[in-house]
Image (spheres, grey):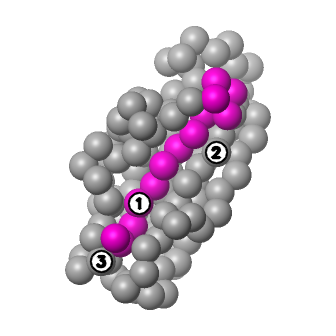
Amino acid sequence: MGLSTHVLDTMHGAPASGMGVALFTTQGDQATLVKRFNLNQDGRNPDGPLYDNSNLKVGTYRLVFDVAGYFKARGVALPEPNFLNQVSLDFGVAHTDQHYHVPLLVSPWSYSTYRGS
C-alpha cells in the first residue's frame, strides 16, 4: 500500500478534516517538497496513499501538519504564541514492499504518532 497518513483531532474526538499537510523527502538538512494537501472528512489525503509501493523509495521523509491553523479554523481560542504551531514528523522507510502508515493524534497541547498498519 505504500505510504499513508491519518489525523485524529483528540480535542473534538473526530478526524481532522481540512487540516493542511505537506510531504517532503529529506536528505540530511535538505527537504524537498513533494506535495501539499488538505485532509478530507475522514482525516486522510483525498487522493489516497501518498505513495504506492511502486513509487515509494527507501529513504527519509517529513510530514508537516498545520495544527494551529486547523484549530484556529475550528474556532478554538489559542494563546499567542501557540503551544503547537506545526507538527513536523521525520521518519525513515527501509522496506518499500511494506505499508508505512503515519497517523497523528493531536490536540492544541499534545500529539502522538506511531507506525500504524
Earlier residue among tags 1 and 3: 1
- Boundaries of the magenta span: 1-13
Q: How many marks?
A: 3
Find the distance from the CA under tag 3 to the CA under tag 2. Answer: 25 Å
Label 1, on which residue?
Answer: 4
Res. 85 visible in picture? no
Find the distance from the CA under tag 1 to the CA under tag 3. Answer: 11 Å
Number of residues whose C-alpha sits closer than 10 Å to that of mark 1, classed few (under 14), some (14–19) or many (20 or more): some
- The image position of residue 65, as x and y in percent, is 51, 45
Q: Quadrant of the N terminus?
A: bottom left
Q: Kindly indicate whether the residue at mark 2 contacts the one at mark 1 (C-beta within 8 angstroms).
A: no
Q: Secondary structure at mark 2?
A: strand
Q: Secondary structure at mark 1?
A: strand
Q: Kindly indicate whether the residue at mark 3 contacts the one at mark 1 (C-beta within 8 angstroms).
A: no
Callout 1 amino acid:
Ser
Earlier residue among tags 3 and 2: 3
- The image position of residue 100, as x and y in percent, is 47, 71
Give the image quarter of residue 46: top left
Above or below 32: residue 9: above
Q: Could you tell me which residue is drawn at 34 percent across and 82 percent down? A: 57
Q: Is residue 34 left or right of residue 108?
A: left
Earlier residue among tags 1 and 2: 1
Find the distance from the CA under tag 1 to the CA under tag 2. Answer: 14 Å
Number of residues whose C-alpha sits closer than 10 Å to that of mark 3, classed few (under 14), some (14–19) or many (20 or more): some
Label 2, on which residue?
Answer: 105
The disc placed on residue 53 is 3
Q: Could you tell me which residue is drawn at 38 percent across and 84 percent down? A: 96
Q: Kindly indicate whether the residue at mark 2 contacts the one at mark 3 (C-beta within 8 angstroms).
A: no
Q: Could you tell me which residue is drawn at 56 percent across and 64 percent down? A: 116
Q: Secondary structure at mark 3?
A: loop
Viewer-side residue, 41 vs 30: 41
